Image (cartoon, rainbow, N blue to C red):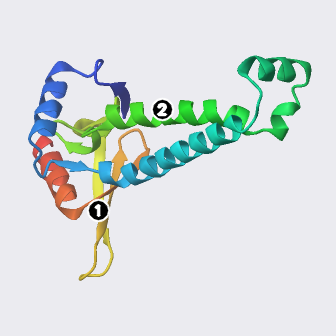
Amino acid sequence: MEKTTWKRLDKALRGELEALLKSPTDAFLSDYGEVVGWWLLVGVACVAGAGAALWDLSTESLGLGDYVRIISANPGYIATRPSILGLPLALIVGAWIAITWVRSLRRRGYAALESAIVVVRGPKLRVVPYDAIESMDQKAYGHRRRRRFTVLTLKLKDGTTTELNVTGRWAGVARERFERAH
């Protein structure tokens, strides 16, 4: 398994992967929806935290210079006023969430290419060429009438295993392409 980025990915693989992402088929399984909720929750917490910190700081008659003098003379003062660090922290985390969200838009999931399986995590990729896979096993979980998921276990030739939580349809496409490659 090779960890890489979009820029360092082989041009042929990159072209195939980009084409797959532009017109998704059963060969690409997006798991973007599974993380967006968490990013949204943290983003709302950042907005609320920044608002609370601004409200708390606005009720004081101290200016920014006053805070700098007080904190430099007594660093423990921060513990009595968490809003002093809360506002910058909320802004930093909020910016990180926004950047991560944009960088991962439509770039999260699993791709079964003609020569490899690629796990896409925004700008980061994990590439598992079919020739590095010794065997593939899949096991479905869940009740027939309810949502099911499949665990696709890749046993690599170097002795390691990797488990992917995917759908049965995607696992079928990956197995078909793996068998074609062998």
- Residue matched to label 1: 138
Residue 5, percent across and down?
A: 34, 24
What type is the residue that disc 2 sits on? Trp
Mark 2 neighbour density, 10 Å: few (under 14) some (14–19) many (20 or more): few
Q: Residue at x 37, y 49 (%)?
A: 36
Does 173 appear above or below 157?
below
Residue 149, percent across and down?
A: 30, 66
Q: Residue at x 70, y 32 (%)?
A: 85
Residue 33 is left or right of residue 22, and the answer is: right
Direction front: furthest residue: 61
Camera-nearest residue between 155 and 32: 32
Camera-nearest residue between 5 and 64: 64
Residue 66 is left or right of residue 76, and the answer is: left
Specify the quadrant of the image occupied by residue 131.
top left
Does 72 appear above or below 152?
above
Of the image marks 2 and 1, the number of the one nearer the N terminus:
2
Residue 125, percent across and down?
A: 33, 32
What type is the residue that disc 1 sits on? Gln
State which quarter of the image contains the N terminus.
top left
**Circle nearer the viewer, 2 or 1:** 2
Residue 120, percent across and down?
A: 31, 38
Specify the quadrant of the image occupied by residue 151.
bottom left
Q: Residue at x 13, y 26 (%)?
A: 15
Q: Residue at x 19, y 26 (%)?
A: 14
Q: Is any part of residue 126 visible from this angle?
A: no
- Residue matched to label 2: 96
